[in-house]
Image (spheres, helix red, strand yellow):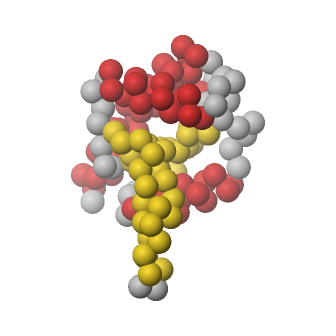
Amino acid sequence: MIHDVEHAEGLANAVIGASIEVHREVGAGLLETAYEECLSHELTLRGITHQRQVDVAINYKGHTIERAYRIDLLIGNSLIVELKAVDELLPVHTAQLLTYLRFQNKGLGLLLNFKAKTLKEGIKRVVL
């Protein structure tokens, strides 16, 4: 488990660097989908393995609910990234990411708010 956390931390730092580059290049004011596309491209340019819009099923008392939620970005199968373009991050955004982490048995996630004046202000690490 310690190796997984260290791996996720390394990925988180790489994703933050890529996200800052995207924000620096395009600024604030776009839709989340545009930031996701830009960030995905930047991650690809940097050789960072990731998946976009990952549908996830959950099991509720023996009943499978297909596509119960969708992860914006799954980085290296270790880190969940949730993208936002909102005036401010709210507790519900953190709760959303915590739920994703719990269902995926991951220890670390990132909330990235691209509407922040500087992306540094819009980064929140969420630990399960």
- Tell me residue 8's x, y (percent): 34, 46
Instruction: Please tell me which residue is depicted at 37% across the width and 28% down the height of the picture.
Output: 43
* Residue, far left: 3
Instruction: Please tell me which residue is depicted at 61% across the width and 59% down the height of the picture.
Output: 95
* Residue, far top: 25
- Tell me residue 73's x, y (percent): 43, 43
Task: Please name whichever residue, 61 or 99, is drawn nearer the observer in this view of the structure.
Answer: 61
The quadrant where residue 76 appears: top left
Which quarter of the figure is the N terminus placed in?
bottom left
Image-based side of 127 in relation to 11, left or right: right
Instruction: Please tell me which residue is depicted at 29% across the width and 36% down the height of the picture.
Output: 49
Image-based side of 67 in relation to 106, left or right: right
Eyeballing the image, is 125 above or below 91? Answer: above
Residue 80 in view: no
- Tell me residue 44's x, y (percent): 33, 26
Eyeballing the image, is 128 above or below 58? Answer: above
Instruction: Please tell me which residue is depicted at 42% across the width and 75% down the height of the picture.
Output: 64
- Tell me residue 46's x, y (percent): 31, 23
Residue 39 in view: yes
